[in-house]
Image (spheres, rainbow, N blue to C red):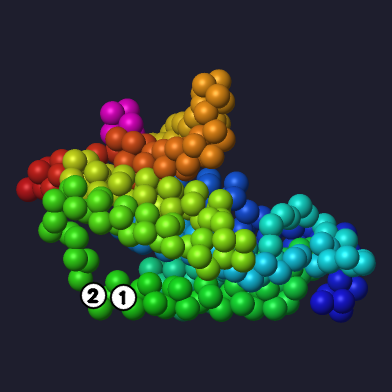
Amino acid sequence: MEWILELRSPALTLVFRAFTSLGDGPFLLAAIPVAYWWWRKEALARVTLVLLLSAMLNDHLKNVFVVPRPFMVPGSTVQPLVEASGWSMPSGHAQSAAVLWGSLAWEIQRPWAFAAAIFIACMVAVSRVYLGVHYPADILVGAGIGIVTVVVWYAVLAKTPWPLARRSLFVQIALPAAALAGWLALAPATTAGGNLPAGAALGACAVLGFWVGICLDRRFLGHTPPKTWRDRIAAAVVGLAALAALRYGIDWALTRLSAPAEVGAALGYAAIGVWISFAGPWLFRRLGLTRSERSLAGAEP
């Protein structure tokens, strides 16, 4: 990786910092909800679910491979240009970029979308080596896992009818919850330390919360995107403000109650998932920013 580190300059650093931010948590936590509220709900539900599941897998694999980051190796001269913690392989940014932009391109099904996805994913991946927080092998493995994840996800979705669609609401929620619980119970047996990766556990909470919200929306709400830019902007501002309040408010409240930090984080991630897919759209409806699929169908001549 020395050759790419030798290319460092203030201008390139600015460029690669910008690209690496496309895989950072704050960007994803803002962009995914807004896209879900504004765009095709079913498409963004698929994109978000596969992205969350991929993040769970990534954190799990990091604790299987336990490869230190370049600057963590004793005697290393690599100077990281951004903060990074945890194990190095596979690269979470490279894997998430491949999954996010690849799945969006798959949903759009246009040549320009696939070209843009390849370009953005490659730049995000390369940025991690340039910034000194990953080896080239880390980003190759991460990107490879991301590509396989997208292909398998959409191959299954395209060829296999969703088996829970006609089941009761309880079954639709209980079976995925049991599957996640089973995975969390078995995961520690495969990690180097024999412990459950914290990021994987939080990812499971986010997946379950988001899935519960999807099921509730399908049964009771039928969210549709706002029709005007005024309503879109209002929904984004209200939705993101409430999301931030959830993110930090639950931690604050449970800290005051002397609850374990892990409990607050788990509840926070689950609440964020429910907020994005159901509670937020419900509030938008109450504020008159959106209409339901049912009301729109009833308004047709």
- What residue is shown at x 25% (from left), y 51% (from top)? 174
Q: Nearer the viewer, residue 20 or 152?
A: 152
- Give above or below for 82 relative to 89: above
Task: Reply above or below: 23 against 150.
Answer: above
Residue 207, percent from left and from top: 40, 52
First to last magenta residue range = 283-289
Q: Secondary structure at mark 2?
A: loop
- Judged left or right of residue 70, residue 292 is left
Q: Position of residue 256 (x, y in %)?
A: 55, 20
- What kind of residue is marked 2? Thr
Specify whether residue 39 is painted magenta: no
- Relative placement, left or right, of 62 versus 15 is left
- List the residue tagged with mark 1: 156
- Which quarter of the rendering shows the N terminus? bottom right
- Using the numbered discs, state the Cα–Cα distance from disc 2 to disc 1 in whole angstroms: 6 Å
- The reply to whether dot 2 and dot 1 touch (C-beta < 8 Å) is yes
Percent from the top left, x then y, of residue 31? 51, 50
Few, some or many residues within 10 Å of mark 2 (<14, 14–19, 20+): few
Q: Tell which of 154 and 231 is nearer to you.
A: 154
Q: Residues within 10 Å of mark 1 (few under 14, many from 20)?
A: few
SS of the residue under disc 1: helix
* Numbered label attached to residue 160: 2
- Whether residue 46 is visible to the viewer of this picture, yes or no, is yes
Q: Is residue 125 visible?
A: no
- Which residue reaches farthest left? 301
